[in-house]
Amino acid sequence: MATLAEHLAERREPEAHELEAKNFPELKNDLILRAARREDVERVPVWVMRQAGRYLPEYNAIGEGLDFFDKCRTPALACAITLQPLVRFPIDAAIIFSDILVILQALGMHCDMVKGKGPTFPQPITCREDIDALNADVDVHESLGYVFKAITLTRHRLGGHVPLIGFAGAPWTLFAYAIEGSGSKTFSKAKSWLYKDPEASHRLLSMITDVTVRYLVAQVRAGAQLLQVFDSWAGSLSPRHFREFAAPYLVRIASAVKAELGTDAVPMICFAKGAHWAFSLLESSDYDVLSLDWTMDPQEAQRATKSRMAFQGNMDPCAMYGSDDTIREEVCRVMSLFGTRGHIANMGHGMSPDMEPRAVAAFVDAVHNFSSRQRVYTIGTRGSVLALWQAHYVLDRLVKKYPTHRFRIKVVDTAGDKDLTTALDKFGTTGVFTDALERALVSGEVDCVVHSLKDVPSTLHPSTRLAAISERHDPRDCVVFNPRHNGRYSSIADLPPGSVLGTSSARRRAFLARAYPSLTFKHVRGNVKTRLRKLDDPANGYDALVLASAGLERLNMEARVGEKLSVDVVPHAVGQAALGVQVRCSAKPGPHGGEGGDDDDDDGDKDAAVLAEMLHASVQCNETALVCSAERGFLRSLGGGCSLPIAVRSQRDADTGRIVLCGNVCSVDGKTLASRTCDAVVTTEAEAAALGEKVAADLKADGGEAILIELRAQRDQQQQQQQQQQRDVDGRTVVSL
């Protein structure tokens, strides 16, 4: 395969396969696409508006004697010009060499590129009859096919090096060009139409919009992997006129293009230069990225768009006239204003002809250096949908609080994820969903791990601690009925004797058996959606499932909840509905358990301390942490875990600080229960843990110890049986071999 430099040197005519929009080389660098979708990136991607243009000596040497638009209309030349900056600079995207005004040319307007003046329309639109004369039904493939050929050719000759950006001018900017006839300082002719003839203005804007949609769709089908819509003159409009004559057409373009492309849709960037008021208007649009000029405030843009969109640009292009050191300083200043997620480095407008190529080199180098200096914190999580929701809950709060830091999520498989058949109480360990995550944390594979707090053993690895406990959601369990029972039952108490409830929780099974002894219990495993599918399949025979209310709420599946169970009937698990974030220890002993390290921390320990502080500041809910510390103190004193039917109910009076904690342990069949309640005014986690320990001591003295001894004996017997069964299986395997 030829290199970019070879393609640039050859400028040869396309071969037949290079004009076919298929079998493109595999993309090697998708940073900009991931950034546009607000996904994790290894570094911030960078490109430059007008990166292929007159500031490059090689541009001025290519196609000598040809008019600007002749270069655009010659696919081999347009391709070569597109590749020029990629040969010179390590940028992360190519943008097809073309012009926003080709749409007006396709509509039937003649445009000249006048030296010293720029694009000029000798016969601008002056009346309604001029609009009527435009070719509204233009076939974009016939009139603008040269653009699509250039895109397809460039995709092939890029060799998957970086993505290719297609683009178009926005309706208002093209409208203004068509009426002004050229650039303008006041745009008085174009704006006068908005007052004198708004109906005709909308008709022309709508016509331009329709052609633009067809044009952009065809660019993607030709090979464009990202689209940008340039509204270069948006800032000339008042907020009122922008809302009426610009925003609706910008929004329509994005929605129509994505609707037409369906699953082939690509990320879209909107650049409404100078329109500070556009942020909130475009927040709910189908654009993925807002490009900011140098006058716009990134934090204001983030607030207005609710941090839903990615951002691009914001650096004053005039900084490119400065020294390399000046450019580096400006890059660091601008990039420090953005978060690490959803940012594309660029300028607030394009390169000017009198700028120097060395400025672009300094700019790109500064972006790369800024990214490489940033510490990336890795958040470990299980891979289920609910676990990923929990990890993103933590990630979003970190990013919002610390927008200049970099975070990423890494999935780690746990024993509970790998074995989806064994009942949870049969694993014989308290870390079914946490052990593998904890190993990844201790080894340095990840920097913190996000757990459902109810899954976290009460005793942590000595080199780790919980840095934060999140606000607790609804800790109750709930009942989800089989769809065939819809309208028949509103409560678990309504189910007839022998009805089958699905659960793998020893706690739920024991307390439900105590409250509803006529029901039958059947093991069910899998993530939330898998369990619901098993419930809905008549072949499995479930009448209902018992799940955590918080999990269904987090997945927006509350509609499936048939009944929320009272904690007086089924007390919840320790830590249920809260998240715990575990980190490696630093020199300073942390909250929630775990030991501190030595005073002479290495940099890794210092990083752990920094991350712990960030987590505590962005995720921690002090009230939940106090209550859960009491619950975990209770569990730790009993030596229990998810394999034993241990449960709590708790509450804290925020005014007095008094925590009331009721601890329970129940026999597997639900027939024997020990329960004790204590309360105390609690202001620290140590005091909360002491309350939990007191409840545990009282409970063990009041019959709980006997139940625990019996439960552990049953568990040990089950484990021995499982081990013997495994030995029998292994023996049969050896014989068969």
Image (spheres, rainbow, N blue to C red):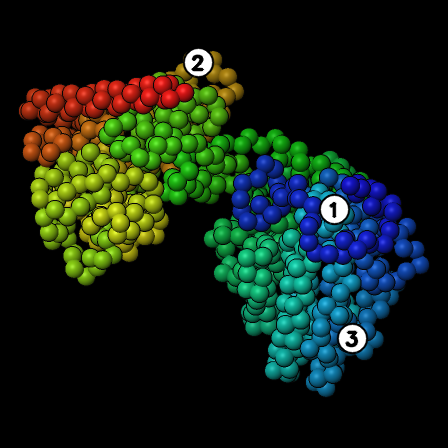
Q: Nearer the viewer, residue 410 or 453?
A: 410
Q: Nearer the viewer, mark 1 or mark 2?
A: 1
434 sits to left or right of 328: left
Query: For the residues marked 3 and 2, what is the alpha-carbon distance in whole angstroms?
Result: 75 Å
Whether residue 543 is situated above or below residue 525 in the rendered picture: below
**Which mark, by number, is residue 158?**
1
Q: Which residue is situated farthest in the right direction here?
A: 65
* Residue under numbered circle 3: 109
In-front residue for pair 314/379 = 379
Q: Please state if 364 lies on the left or on the right of 244 as rendered.
A: right
Type of the residue with mark 2: Asp
Q: Does residue 617 appear anywhere in the picture? A: no
As helix, strand or loop, the secondary structure at mark 1 comes to: helix
Q: Residue at coordinates 44% horizontally, 25% vertically from top-left? A: 440
CB atoms of marks 1 and 2 within 8 Å: no
| Residue 329 percent location from the top left of the image | 68, 37
Query: How many other residues sit within 10 Å of disc 2, few (<14), some (14-19) or many (≥20)?
Result: few
User: Is 457 rendered above or below residue 527?
Assistant: above
Instruction: Name the kind of residue labelled 1 in the image.
Output: Leu
Look at mark 2 in the image and give the residue it sits on.
599
Q: Tell me residue 107's x, y (percent).
A: 74, 75
